[in-house]
Image (tube, rainbow, N blue to C red):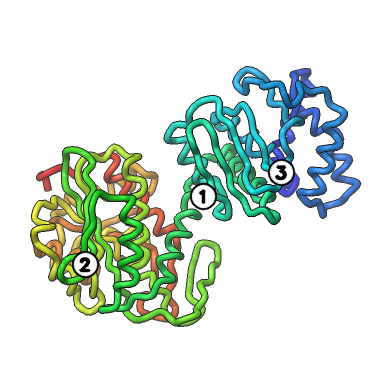
Amino acid sequence: MKYKEILLARHGLQKGDLMRSFHDEVCNAGKLLMGTEQWFHEVGDQITDEDFISFLQESAKTIDSPGRGMLIDPVLGDLPITDFDPYIRGVIRWMNELGIYTYGSCDGHGRGEARIYLKKYPNGKHLELLKAAIPTSLRIRIEGKIIRVIYPKKGGQLLLLDFAENLYQVWKNPSLLKDLQAAHFKGLLLECLNIPGASTDESRFRSRVRNKLSSLIDHSFIDRKGNLLGFVELGNGPTVLLSAQLDMVEEIVEGREIIEENSILRSSVGILGADDRAGVAAILEILSGVKRTNFSGTLKVAFTVEEEIGCLGSRAIDQDFIEDVDAAIVIDRRGNRDIVTSWSNYVHFCPEEYGRLFEEAGKIAGMDDWKITPGGISDAMVFAEYGIPSVNLSAGYQNEHKETETVDYKSTFETVLLVESVLHYQLIKQGSI
């Protein structure tokens, strides 16, 4: 039953369409469904998308429709599903169901680019949804009221059906949007994991990160120690430092593979390197989305070197850079949903109220099990020594420094959501901690 539901959804249909037709409501999609159960019975369970498209194309010939030249307002009338190109039907159906209204489309006929024409300019939530739902093998370009979906010419049209399936799943269960966003984040994390950079040899990874920062912040530079520093000004308010380390405890094994099991990533041999490539990826993701939040203030970033050999990078950081920082957020803690505010309850990184606001942010974001806990030595302790209230947040990895190291990319993405909650609700106040 689940298989048929998804197959129908990939092509812009659902069983409920039949009920609309049975009750005499004009329903183009329902008419297209007539006879599908009999056809399913005849062809058995081994139904391909191509088989179903052929069946639908034949069925559409028997249905009177407005014709390809007739534009129908999706708000006022039934979508002419029978007239849409076969590989774009599902995308158009579920975009309209999600409130992203269209007036025209083309699946590209195998030439590598589908086009969707919107009735109105998309808003921020529409853009967020579309970018999350697009499969990672596709590229999406949104230019005003035109959406271009670029796919591989060889067999790439089938990926448009995957796009439709993702949109359907979000329409049916909006909470799945977070899973789709996490899947996109995984691509960034994998990129970071595959670049070498043990302590004292971080330059290659630092260059890659700096290149990514160029489109995310106002300015970046490398200080005398080799730390990658930068800032983006987003209005009046507190100055918040985001920090993660660039170095690994040892080099990754050349030619290793990263194995994925559900949301868990591990290395085929040697360390994975998620300590702390997960933290770096999380900060890059936060920066990419911060302009969609209500945050007002300045974000500074410090990607430090030589953390694994004694926090040498953070201890040598340019003091002029951090003298105006109101609070620091380090992402370099194992596990998930930990807010580290001290070293073994012996050296405290911040006043208790600073740690508590992260618990509050977790509750706001629907993750009420983020909790304050003691932890180990990290750059957060060094920033605290400079008089900056600091926390060290979980980055989703386990068994760091060992060949059994893993990272749960969904947990890492939850840390992104936590920090976004802190920033969006402006929980950090200038000079109040």
The amino acid type, in three-letter code, at marker 2 is Asn
Quickly name the residue at label 1.
180
Q: Which of the two discs, 2 and 1, sits closer to the camera?
A: 2
78 relative position to 392: left or right: right
The picture places residue 117, in percent across and down from the top left corner, at 58, 31
Asked whether 282 or 152 is in front, the reply is: 152
Which mark sits nearer the N-terminus, 2 or 1?
1
Say above or below: 183 vs 105. Answer: below
Is there a contact, CB below 8 Å, between mark 2 and mark 3?
no
Give me the C-alpha separation between circle 2 and circle 1.
Answer: 33 Å
The residue at which mark 2 appears reads as: 227
What separation in Å lies between label 1 and label 3 (alpha carbons)?
27 Å
Q: Which residue is mark 3?
A: 109
Residue at the spot 17% in from the left edge and 71% down from the top edge: 225
Dot placed on the residue nearer the N-terminal end, 2 or 3: 3
Quarter of the image where one finds residue 200:
bottom left
Tag 3 secondary structure: helix
- How packed mark 3 is, by other alpha carbons closer than 10 Å (few <14, some 14-19, many 20 or more), is few
Q: Position of residue 360 (x, y in %)?
A: 28, 45
Q: Amino acid at mark 1?
A: Leu
Q: Quadrant of residue 208?
A: bottom left
Horizontal relation, residue 34 to residue 249: left or right: right
Instruction: Answer whether labels 2 and 1 touch (C-beta < 8 Å).
Output: no
Label 1: how many Cα within 10 Å (few below 14, some 14–19, many 20+): many
Q: From where the camera sits, is residue 135 visible?
A: yes
